[in-house]
Image (tube, coloured by chain):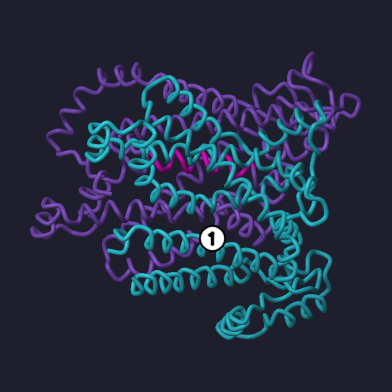
Chain colours: A purple, B cyan
Amino acid sequence: MARILDVTVEPARAAAIRRTRPADAGRILRQRPLMVLGGAILLAIGLLALLAPWIAPHDPTELNVIDRLRPPGGDYWLGTDAYGRDMLSRILYGGRVSLFVGVSVALLSTVIGLAIGVVAGYYRLADAIVMRFMDGLMAIPGILLAIALMALTKASLEVVVIAITIPEIPRVVRLVRAVVLSIREQTYVHAAITVGTRFHRLMLRHVLPNTVAPLVVQATYICASAVLIEAYLSFLGVGTPPEIPSWGNIIADGRLYVQIAFWQVLFPGVFLALMVLSINVLGDGLRDLLDPRLARRM
Amino acid sequence: MWAYVARRVLAIVPVMGVVAVVVFMLLHLSPGDPAAIIAGDQATSEDIAAIREKLGLDRPLALQFVGWVGRLLVGDLGSSIFMNRPVLMLIGERVEPTIALALATMVFAICLAIPMGVVAAWKAGSWIDQLIMTFAVLAFSLPVFLIGYGLVYGFALQWDLLPVQGFVSLRDDPRGFVTHLVMPTMTLGLVYTALLARMTRGTMLEILNEDYVRTARAKGLGRTRVLVIHALKNASVPIVTTIGIGVALLIGGVVVTESVFAIPGVGRLTIDAVLQRDYPVIQGVILVVSGIYVLINLVIDLTYSVLDPRIRY
């Protein structure tokens, strides 16, 4: 974990980096076309999802029995489902669910994991207890734990977010704890402690800045996996409530008609794959950018 | 040696202890009365009282936990609320398809991923490396059901080569067993292959930079010999460790794949249990699956400590 220290930047150097940033940014973007492409696709999907209420051609829940199972074309660009609902509108609205779940899970698990990780890394006594608990939590396969958590109460979007967040937390805690443990041994931290720096100031000035880079990368990967897991849970019937159009729900509805109306599985599936892929590519790019040494290992 | 084995085996006690606490608390963390949730919307207060008594929910929490762990230790995972049969027996009936799928996927992925990772590392930066890595990133992001239904559409519906879905027991019909397993294995295998290929490449890259690999090359050993005997052998510890940790991902994938192909495995059992809020079954499945996951990783660690003495120190 010592490699994470590479992102430690002295104040003077940080200022220098800040000054050269515009030029650097241009070079970075030219050198990483894939990352730019990933970011662009993600931005496009995000915008489509956010603007869904204004750009969707139909009401995503409007039933229209005469137009059921229409193939793509005409008034329905991506066809209709078994109830005659417009697929394009449903997919656009479904993007909102994925976006919401991905961003919420990434933020929540990072913030909670950061808080727990800092405490575990700093206080020896808490460390032993917290890490034992995290080891145990990690022994339960993530999707299985999320499925079980969904059984706790009536399904809603918030419950889905919580059920996906909990299994992701231990990985963040481990990462943050490792950073805190290595930072604690740095001379400048010893110096800061010696001159009587308070805990919260120590964390804010010295520890948190060092966790930012690895956490941003980790949060990106968590976002991708959360989007995928939400779709899996909904597909399995234990995720987002069926009346909300989410990509997993649309695919679950369409699976019965794969033979005669493949578009019901294909289109939401492609959107899902594109979104997850672009987040992952963005994550790989950020990792290379923020921590070149880590990049070589993967 | 034995001290290491003992230490490593003892280390799983707290891990499984935490798993047990989490699984136990699953039922008690639910907001509201667990007995009422299990009973459902149409239950009368007598139904709820009956369930409460049956599950011992009327006793103090600590007492419930001690009693529950005590029964676990003698292999009693409780009984399903809806099917009124022992959970262990229910899992036992569903275990064949799940294990068959998981094992087939693993073999498929290992056979594919290790050569891919080795070649990519050896030709690092070349077009073939980029091709393999593009595949790895792509396959890792593809949702299981997109691959699954894609294969079904092609191989089963269009060309009629393989059965659309379902599972046949090995004992009943070995041929049907294989044909029913081909598509699920490929579906799940692609995701797992992507993960392993990436890991193999990363580890091999590091090792190919080591001094002893340069020495082996310098003394004129053949390409295959250097790659397999010198590099891959040393890369195997992190690779096999990844395979072990990846089992968690595999289990999640198995649940989804079982659903795509209507395979009556442990995944189906879990989903049905969640939909009916059959808590003893949910708890039992999580305990057993997590236990198996922990054991697999224990066995991997111990095997390596025997084969590679460096690990013991």
Residue A247, image x and y in percent?
A: 67, 36
Residue at image coords 15%, 38%: A11
Total residue callouts: 1
A120 falls in the magenta region = no
Which class describes the residues within 10 Å of circle 1: few (<14), some (14-19), or many (20+)?
Answer: many
- Identify which residue, B30 or A143, lies in the foreground: A143
Q: Is residue B171 left or right of residue A291?
A: right
Q: Secondary structure of the magenta portion, mostly?
A: helix
Residue B242, image x and y in percent?
A: 45, 49
Residue A209 shows up from this direction: no
- Residue A60 vertical position relative to residue B126 in the rendered view, above or below: below
Residue at image coords 31%, 21%: A28
Residue B113 shows up from this direction: yes
**Dot 1 falls on which chain?**
B
Quarter of the image for residue A256 reads top right
The residue indicated by pointer 1 is B293
Please state the extent of the stretch shown in magenta in the rendering: A216-231
A218 falls in the magenta region = yes
Residue B214, image x and y in percent?
A: 24, 34
Q: Is residue B295 left or right of residue A80?
A: left
- Identify which residue, A116 or A59, lies in the foreground: A116
User: Furthest residue to the top?
Assistant: A74
Residue A32, image x and y in percent?
A: 37, 21
